[in-house]
Amino acid sequence: MKYALFISCLFWISCTGTLSDNQRKKIKEEMENSEIKKVTEAQITEAAFQYGRQVAAIIEKKDKTLTNQSFLDSISQVFNVEIISLQPENNSLRAIEKQLLEAYQTDVQASDNIQKMGTDSVLYTKPFTRERPDGSAKFTKALGIRMTKKQVILTIN
């Protein structure tokens, strides 16, 4: 695949003459993205935590209730992730998401989490709680960010 891209770029250059700065930049980015990187599962997990926390921080600043769908859709497109609101009454959740909800309901002090979803995806979750009048916390919902391992690996330097 990367050889085909390289050969097609050479062919295009030879047919059109010189490249603009923008075209050179795009070609360089494509070549960097097609480089083979060797990463461990621990590196993927750490990068997924960082990426998930970065996206979650942006969402929390603007829409902590997770109700502004147009904002969530735009964040999804920018970061190339899928953002979901994990709520106990949602019947369309995957098994791992239901298990995480049960864990968050049982342990209100639980923090953000990364879980594998199949062989090529990961799920970042962050619980949201509400303080009761007696000072205790009650789990309300969780923010779920589904991302591909490829996207996570591309964030690793």
Image: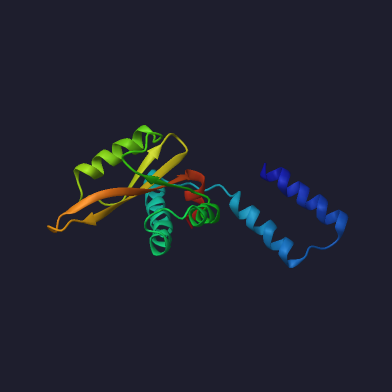
Q: Position of residue 43 (x, y in %)?
A: 40, 50
State the residue at coordinates (73%, 67%). Answer: 21
State the residue at coordinates (29%, 36%). Answer: 99
Total labels drawn: 0
| In the depicted structure, whether residue 43 falls above or below residue 63 | above
Q: Position of residue 133 (x, y in %)?
A: 15, 58
Q: Is residue 103 left or right of residue 31?
A: left
Say which quadrant the N terminus sits in: top right
State the residue at coordinates (82%, 56%). Answer: 13
Residue 149 or 99: which is nearer the viewer?
99
Q: Quadrant of residue 15?
A: bottom right
Residue ranking furthest to the front: 133
Residue ranking furthest to the left: 134
Residue 39 or 126: which is nearer the viewer?
126
Q: Position of residue 89 (x, y in %)?
A: 33, 38
Residue 31 or 23: which is nearer the viewer?
23
Q: Position of residue 74 (x, y in %)?
A: 54, 56
Q: How is the image coloured?
A: rainbow
